[in-house]
Image (cartoon, rainbow, N blue to C red):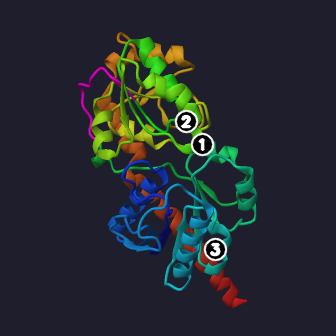
Amino acid sequence: MRIAIVSTPFVPTPPPQYGGTELVVAELAEGLVARGHDVTLFATGDSKSSAELRWLFPSAHWPPDALTDVDHVSWALRQVATGEYDLAHVHSAVALPLTRWLRRLPVVYTIHHEREEELSALYRRYPDVYYVAISKDQRSREVPLRRCTVIHHGLDPEKYQWTSQPQDYLAFVGRFAPYKGPHTAIDVAERAGLPIRVAGEVHDPDREFAEREVWPRLTRPHVTHLGPIGLTVKAPLLRDARALLAPLTWNEPFGLILIEAMLSGCPVIAFPRGSVPELVEEGVTGFIARDAEEMAEIVRPGGPLDDFDRERCRRRAVERFSRDRMVEEHEALYQRAVDANLARARTVGVA
């Protein structure tokens, strides 16, 4: 198939540090190329891909803003409209009205966010789009969509390593936002008597929270602050961590860091919000805690982590969350969309 994939203009694809959507897009593009498809990736000029790379902006534009998004997506879809493609896969909601330019070309759109009423109203107006939800929980919270397939994210397992002899520290990796719970993770580690390595950064909307709840905690003696990190630091961090803490207070649509930990043989200890019960298999890839007190009990020496089978965790994560599995499921969806499009064209031709 000839496939056009439209990433975002805000972060390179793949991202050097933060950027979940762009990481998944990069993995998908690489996997499709490896399986013999002709893929064009519309991203930023500082992106890297085995696919044919096209860009409007030579470098990523951060922070995100609507005008840059519209500029990038409208340019990309104009390129798609004048090209010879079987299908377009977009990753920004602003693309949906612009898909009118694509006439009868099938369009796939991945929902990367929690439910927002304004966007849900938009989705209702485009029932012919093939929607991808990234978890069953996310789909259950969204408006009913006629064409909506759940496809979990997947990553290349070869980029992550595991060990049977982890160190004694805990890890937190994520934005310094209240709903991610970095402050709770630090408190849990202190209660359990363990050191914690904290990686992440604050975005402008969460700065007041970070100044009040996070910065003071980062100075505590059991805390090592790593700042924002890329894969070269993240992979060994997760490999050697006793556990990854994810004390979420929102309905996370997916949570890439969870499967990155699992692929590293590192158990995920998380609150049961959003996709967590769907992703974490109790005792196999992690544990679900009701509150901070129970989280501390789980990670404390003498608890269930002492005998945790990290090889089994890694093996199960590869089964469920590998790039190959994600690519195969997208490939099947693409084929259904293309076949339906061809059948519709034949019907119109006969009429």
Quarter holding the C terminus is: bottom right
Query: Label 1 near label 2: C-beta < 8 Å?
Result: yes
Q: Residues within 10 Å of mark 1 (few under 14, many from 20)?
A: few
> Tag 2 or tag 3, which sits nearer the N-term?
3
Query: Which residue type carries mark 1?
Result: Pro
Circle 3/circle 2 CB separation < 8 Å = no
Residue that sits furthest to the top in the current view: 302
Please state which amino acid type lies under the numbered disc 2: Ala
| Residue 90 position in % (x across, y down) | 55, 65
User: What residue is pinned by disc 3?
Assistant: 99
Residue 163: in magenta span: yes
Q: Circle 1 — which element?
A: helix
Expressed as whole percent of the image width and height from the top left, the position of residue 44 reads: 43, 67
Q: Which residue has dot 1 on it?
A: 205
Image location (x, y in percent) of residue 153: 47, 49
Measured along the vertical axis of the image, is residue 148 above or below residue 346? above
